[in-house]
Image (cartoon, rainbow, N blue to C red):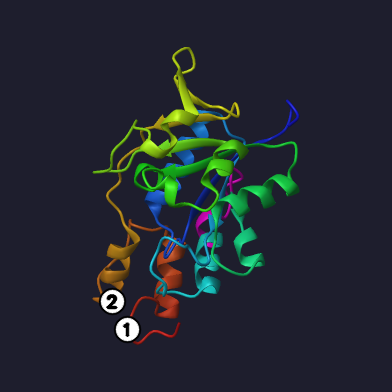
């Protein structure tokens, strides 16, 4: 990795739909870590979630595009749309590295997901491929290493990070706890209630125009 390469965060999700808590988290991590940009990775078939998202990947991609329009620090990463099978994070990191070999990558995930890291595909290699930033979520444990990976890290007090045996850094970062969830937004849409101020205006308009998240909506 070149010293002058871009610093890129990878923040994955189904974004069904993308909402303000997603965007605020990306902004806070970018600012705190001095990243050049955060790439929002659209997950097509996440292996740890039940199948059958409420909106098609085409709708989710368009909503994500609308949500970040005009923000030079947020970009879409559509690499998971370009391959078949489940959306494994280790493969996303490898593809991104191949496309930007001089970049310093930081994978961003929630504390709840990190607690289950041992269930991820090839998780030991994943932790050696990029830095990891674990963000706090309301009600989720924070600043705690899962038992399966404790022996692979040591704490470095001068930097305030855990260092993997590969040299990669792991840090815990509290972010503003906005109590917004995609499932609640979908439920509100199905009940005909407002989602204003929960999602960007452009996303709210898109949801309304396409009748998304209604039981009778076309998928």
User: How many angstroms separate mark 2 from mark 1 (CA)?
Assistant: 7 Å
Rendered residue at 75%/36% (across/down) = 102
Pinpoint residue 142: horizontal percent, then vertical percent.
32, 35
- Answer whether residue 77 is magenta in the image: no
Residue 146 in sight here: no
Rendered residue at 43%/52% (across/down) = 119
61 or 93: nearer the eye?
93
SS for callout 2 = helix
Q: Residue 190 carries which label?
A: 2
Pinpoint residue 86: horizontal percent, then vertical percent.
54, 65
Rendered residue at 52%/61% (across/down) = 43
Q: Quadrant of the C terminus?
A: bottom left
SS for callout 1 = loop
Q: Which mark is residue 215?
A: 1
24 or 127: nearer the eye?
127
Which callout, 2 or 1, points at the residue further toward the start of the chain?
2
Label 2 CA crowd tier, 10 Å (few <14, some 14–19, many 20+): some
20 or 14: nearer the eye?
14
Left or right side of 9 for 113: left
Relative height, residue 197 to residue 151 (above, below): below
Left or right side of 191 for 92: right
Relative height, residue 86 to residue 139 (above, below): below
Q: Give the range drawn in magenta.
A: 66-74
Do the residues bearing badges 2 and 1 touch, measured as CB atoms within 8 Å? yes
Rendered residue at 58%/34% (across/down) = 35
Pinpoint residue 51: horizontal percent, then vertical percent.
42, 72
Pinpoint residue 76: horizontal percent, then vertical percent.
60, 55
């Amino acid at each position: 990795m070149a010293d002058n390469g871009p610093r890129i965060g990878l923040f994955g999700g189904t974004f069904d739909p993308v909402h303000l808590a997603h965007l605020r988290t990306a902004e806070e991590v970018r600012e705190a870590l001095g990243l050049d940009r955060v790439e929002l990775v659209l997950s097509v078939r996440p292996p740890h979630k039940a199948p059958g998202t409420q909106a098609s990947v085409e709708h989710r991609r368009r909503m994500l595009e609308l949500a970040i329009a005009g923000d030079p620090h947020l970009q879409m990463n559509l690499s998971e749309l370009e391959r078949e099978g489940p959306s494994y994070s280790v493969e996303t990191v490898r593809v991104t590295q191949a496309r930007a070999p001089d970049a310093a990558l930081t994978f961003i995930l929630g504390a709840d997901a990190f607690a289950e890291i041992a269930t991820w595909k090839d998780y030991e290699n994943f932790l050696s491929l990029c830095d990891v930033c674990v963000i706090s979520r309301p009600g989720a444990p924070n600043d705690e290493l899962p038992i399966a990976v404790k022996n692979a890290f040591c704490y470095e007090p001068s930097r305030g990070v855990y260092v993997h045996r590969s040299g990669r850094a792991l840090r815990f970062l509290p972010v503003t706890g906005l109590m917004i969830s995609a499932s609640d937004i979908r439920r509100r849409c199905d009940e005909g209630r407002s989602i204003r101020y929960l999602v960007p205006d452009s996303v709210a308009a898109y949801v309304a125009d396409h009748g998304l998240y209604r039981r009778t909506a076309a998928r």
